[in-house]
Amino acid sequence: MSRLFMFEKPLGMRDTLPELYEKKHHVRTLMENAIKQWGYQFIETPTLEYYETVGTASAILDPELFKLLDKDGHTLVLRPDMTAPIARVAASRLLENDLPLRLAYAGNVYRAQQREGGRPAEFEQIGVESINDDTVSSDGEVIALLVSSLKEAGLSQFQVSVGHIGFAQELFMQILGTNGRATSLRRFLYEKNFVGYRDQVNSYSLSSIDKQRLLQLLELRGGEEVIGKALDIIEDGYGKESLVQLKELWEVITDFGLEDHVKFDFTLVSHMSYYSGILFEAYAGNVGFPIGNGGRYGLIEKFGKKASATGFAVRLDRLLEAMGTQKITTTIECIFFSQERRKEAFLLAEKMKAEGRKIVLQDINGVKNLDVFTKKFANTTFLIGGAL
């Protein structure tokens, strides 16, 4: 074994040690239970998918895909997200009766990094997909479930920002006329580079009124009142249709009683090319990136089925970061035994495990440093034979 790689891991990969594993398991379980209460059913998809199907359908950029060849020469990818594989399953096996589907998942995804920078190349997502229901009620339900599951996980301070993929795009096209310039402005919004956005707008040869319309987009954040402000800067077309959807969505959010956690943000855009309507991101604490995101998409059509869907995905690592130093208490007790009383120790352990307790069985002759070892089980150690 090369000493250079003896303790190294591939770029962006991480080890999960026991304490962090327990925190992840605890939070994942709470979220899974919350999601199941809303009638969503969990499924699993393969870690490996065909590049020609899931790889190309995914909105993840090609350089970020982990690729490999199978024995027949077919190109495979480690799944870069969960939405594309679930779209594949839904289109091929679950949409036969043209009924709404509510599916959920928890699994790792893989995105290659060009440099370290502290960014993981493997991380866990937990989320849902509401499929074959194109109503705004479905969008509202998914957002409400996101809020509910984050609360159940133990997160109290967070906000869900909601926008519409069509509003900014329509505004840009009405004023700028070309998709190239619209793409340029969208990139500034996606990167949250509002200074760069303003500079770019001011560099265009536009009327002062049109420049002001583009700059007013940055101010469209808040509650229901911003819909009226948005109406003032958009002409008839898809942009106004998006406002009708957002107004209805606010009514759904109000019915769920979530006004304190949900706000509009018309600067919200996404690098995911398959979003087609309402979209949203969840932010919390001092985490500099969204802990979760989602929205309406038409990806299933790439797999031959005409069906709209909406859903969300929560990044478990970012959620744990937002929750800070919150500790998960796990009590593990230890029974030390000598060889002559081994069976007695085993019977005691079985009795204690039947009571739901977590038990370590340890031959006293197998511990080289008893003082250090027993500190791991302070006030919970039992001795069967011999003496400490």
Image (spheres, rainbow, N blue to C red):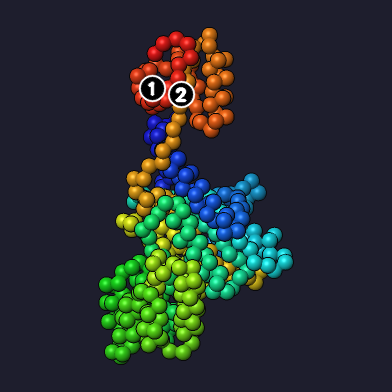
Q: Secondary structure at mark 1?
A: helix
Q: Which mark is residue 374?
A: 1
Residue 302 spot, x, y in % from top left: 61, 67
For residue 285, side relative to residue 108 (left or right):
left
Q: Residues within 10 Å of mark 2 (few under 14, many from 20)?
A: many
Residue in view at x 49 percent, y 25 percent: 360
Amino acid type at circle 2 is Cys
x 43%, y 43%: residue: 23
In front: 165, or 344?
344
Which amino acid type is marked by label 1? Answer: Thr
- Residues tagged 1 and 2 counted as in contact (Cβ below 8 A): yes
- Of the 4 image quadrants, the one containing the N terminus is top left
The percent position of residue 292, horizontal first and vertical second, equals 44, 59
Looking at the rendered image, the quarter that the C terminus falls into is top left
* Foreground of the two, 274 or 104: 104
Closer to the N terminus: mark 1 or mark 2?
2
Residue 24: numbered disc: none
Residue occupying the point 40% across, 34% down: 7
Using a 10 Å C-alpha cutoff, classify the residue at mark 1 as few (fewer than 14 neighbours), some (14 to 19) or many (20 or more): some
The residue where tag 2 is placed is 334
| Spatial CA span between label 1 and label 2 | 8 Å
Q: What is the x, y in percent for residue 300?
A: 61, 67
Residue 134: quadrant of the picture:
bottom right
Work out whether 66 lies above or below 170. above
